[in-house]
Image: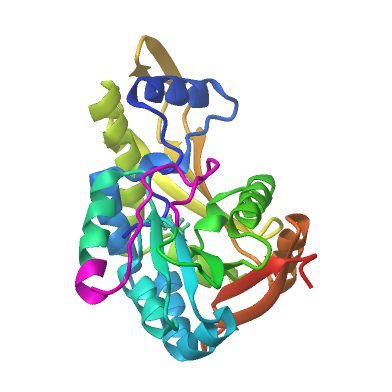
Amino acid sequence: MSALRDEQRPPDNELLQVVQRGLRAQPKRLPSWLFYDEKGSELFEQICEQPEYYLTRAEIALLREHATDIANVLGPDVRLVEYGSGHAIKTRLLLEHLQTPVSWVPIEISSEPLRISMHNMEQVFPQLPIQPLSTDFTRPLRLPVPPRMPGRTVIYFPGSTIGNFEERDAAQLLRKMRGEMGDNGGILVGADLKKDKKVIEAAYNDAAGVTAAFTLNMLTRLNRELGCNFELSGFRHRAHYNAMIGRIETHILSKREQRVRVGRMQVLFREDEAMQVEYSCKYSLEDFAELAASAGLAVQHVWTDPEGLFSLQHLTRASAK
Ligand code: AVJ
């Protein structure tokens, strides 16, 4: 399942306004949730299989290596609330090792992916109560009443999706989770680590061009859903690692001066003008601890894969000692 899937998506009639606002901004920018239509979600799955995209493989490797330890740290009778609709292998590895989990609560705004992952999980864990929530996880949540008293509530947010949020928004999201998990709850969050710029840039510029297709698919989507006339051959993908800030900055570049229709608006693109479409933030362990602290949380445990590419972090309330 893809990670950041439309969770901030407004109702259809607002889509045009969101896009027009982004294209009036200077510099132009569009939100990254626009990537995840059906085709985009499929392309994201393919990205995860590219040799350069180390994130997914590293996160799975670390779960395989440390699943028992992670389950021990989380404790028995966990209610697992997942931000996103389940990442087949990852969620399975975690649930397999948890001791008598109380329930799994996948949160996903798109109903079709939610339905599919529920169906798959039911096959693998027929005894496990599943309590899906079809909503935008960035909004305040009302969690369903659990089937029995949980030992703790743990919010699972894998895949480095947190990296798509700028620092202030990431802190705000973590603070929201802090409220939802309760006094003795926890957060299990995947965060990609800072490393050699070449390795990071390669992950977002795969040789087969899948990431480029994923990025440009956003324009295809706007053509279809809003009747825009973006000419695909007039634009290209660019992903650059900003080492100062520690993030991949993905842009769609206009190859020439051109005009595009967006509703009743005509948008002018200059030659080489860059439109920002995604940030993917990378952290050092210190960076992440600082981010957690700014949300009233403390890092209790960190696990990494054998190569030290990716981290899984267990956060609890800083004051709950
Ligand atoms: C799904 C947000 C974790 O930022 O690495 C992959 C999305 N974008 N290649 C990421 C993505 C380009 C991915 N996340």
Q: Which residues are magenta?
A: 121-145
Residue 310 figure quarter: bottom right
Magenta region, mostly helix, strand or loop? loop
Q: Position of residue 189 (x, y in %)?
A: 55, 66
Q: Relative to residue 9, is residue 161 drawn left or right?
A: right
Q: Relative to residue 320, is residue 36 drawn left or right?
A: left
Q: Position of residue 290 (x, y in %)?
A: 76, 63
What scheme was used to colour the molecule?
rainbow
Q: Position of residue 257 (x, y in %)?
A: 42, 24
Check residue 282 for magenta coloring: no
The number of numbered badges drawn on the structure is: 0
Q: Position of residue 216 (x, y in %)?
A: 33, 42
Q: Residue at x 20, y 62 (%)?
A: 119
Q: Which residue appears farthest toward the front when viewing the image? A: 148
Residue 209 figure quarter: bottom left
Q: Relative to residue 180, is residue 228 drawn left or right?
A: left
